[in-house]
Image (tube, helix red, strand yellow):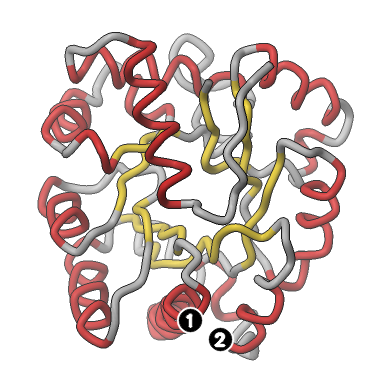
């Protein structure tokens, strides 16, 4: 069994065939999917999809791109919404200095509010970090000093130092289709170095389809190929990698009931 720990099933890219997308994922061995919130203002849409499919769960949070538009979202708001049975994570929140779509101060403030919600609820924080390694590491170190919280660096494409900082602080690291790209040798080397019990796989669908679908719409079924490349990078059997990443998922996303794929 595999888990897609991060996808966006609420996005319009899937409107025409959402049932088929979920069915294809199940047929590919993907037993659980987590559809990730990017706007608290649109949380009801995300939750409706999670409610519709027994194998789909969701998060609640504000993507750093929208941090400036949701400055009024408090830690208490996140904690309240996270009480729903289908909400199994906080986020995604973080820092994105590549696009800089929101003021950096707003991104940092939003990240800290989400960290506080993860600390209070015990739910894992899904961290988005792009071109912000030093600031992200500094915030994580500072906040972890205030009290531990579960978290993962999602769609990891940053440098080795941030990966090792995350591991040192008790975080998990999730790899997407980027891991399969021809020029991702450095990323595969990082993936090979990290502890096996901290690794997850994801799609970030509809974005970042792995080879050989690169440039096309991604979907949760394709997480199997990312798992395959991760196994190759680490020199282990593909089935063993699937077992390990799935075991890691249920340890981190402890609110998700453990299931066996029929």
Relative to 220, is 142 above or below?
below
| Tag in front: 1 or 2 | 1
For label 2, the crowd category at 10 Å Cα-Cα, with few meaning under 14, some 14 to 19 and many 20 or more, is: some
Q: Callout 1: helix, strand or loop?
A: helix
Q: Callout 2: helix, strand or loop?
A: helix
Q: Is residue 157 left or right of residue 107?
A: left
Give me the C-alpha separation between circle 1 and circle 2. 9 Å
Per the rendering, the mark at residue 153 is none
Q: Quadrant of residue 43?
A: bottom right
Residue drawn at the location 44% of the way across and 14% of the way down? 211
x and y, in percent, of residue 234 in the image: 18, 20
Of the image marks 1 and 2, the number of the one nearer the N terminus: 2
Residue drawn at the location 78% of the way across and 57% of the way down? 47
Residue drawn at the location 38% of the way across and 31% of the way down? 245
Of the 4 image quadrants, the one containing the C terminus is top right
Residue drawn at the location 75% of the way across and 26% of the way down? 22
| Nearer-the-camera pick, 71 or 6 | 6
Relative to 84, is 19 above or below?
above
Relative to 250, is 127 above or below?
below
x and y, in percent, of residue 33 in the image: 63, 37
For label 1, the crowd category at 10 Å Cα-Cα, with few meaning under 14, some 14 to 19 and many 20 or more, is: some
Q: Is residue 5 left or right of residue 195?
A: right
Per the rendering, the mark at residue 75 is 2
Q: Is residue 78 left or right of residue 231?
A: right
Q: Quadrant of residue 119?
A: bottom left
Residue annotated with mark 1: 120
x and y, in percent, of residue 230 in the image: 30, 21
**Is mark 1 in CB contact (under 8 Å) with mark 2?**
yes
Report how many numbered discs are placed on residues in the image. 2
x and y, in percent, of residue 130 in the image: 34, 55
Q: Is residue 103 visible?
A: no
């Amino acid at each position: 069994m595999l888990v897609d720990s991060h996808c966006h099933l609420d996005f319009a890219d899937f409107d025409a065939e959402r049932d088929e997308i979920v069915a294809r994922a199940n047929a590919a061995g993907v037993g659980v999917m987590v559809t990730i919130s990017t706007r608290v203002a649109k949380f009801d849409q995300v939750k409706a999809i999670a409610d519709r499919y027994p194998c789909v769960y969701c998060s609640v949070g504000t993507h750093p791109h929208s941090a400036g538009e949701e400055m009024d979202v408090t830690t208490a708001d996140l904690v309240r919404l996270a009480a729903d049975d289908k909400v199994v994570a906080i986020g995604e929140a973080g820092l994105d200095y590549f696009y800089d779509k929101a003021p950096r101060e707003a991104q940092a403030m939003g990240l800290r509010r989400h960290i506080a919600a993860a600390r209070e609820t015990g739910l894992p924080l899904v961290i988005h970090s792009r071109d912000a390694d030093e600031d992200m590491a500094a915030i994580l170190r500072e906040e972890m000093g205030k009290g531990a919280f579960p978290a993962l660096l999602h769609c990891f494409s940053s440098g080795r130092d941030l990966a090792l900082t995350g591991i040192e602080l008790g975080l998990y690291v999730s790899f997407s289709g980027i891991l399969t790209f021809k020029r991702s040798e450095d990323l595969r080397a990082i993936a090979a170095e990290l502890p096996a019990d901290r690794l997850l796989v994801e799609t970030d669908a509809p974005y970042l389809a792995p080879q050989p679908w690169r440039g096309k719409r991604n979907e949760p079924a394709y997480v199997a190929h990312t798992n395959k490349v991760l196994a190759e990078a680490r020199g282990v059997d593909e089935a063993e990698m699937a077992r390990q990443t799935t075991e890691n998922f249920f340890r981190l996303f402890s609110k998700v009931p453990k299931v066996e794929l029929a």
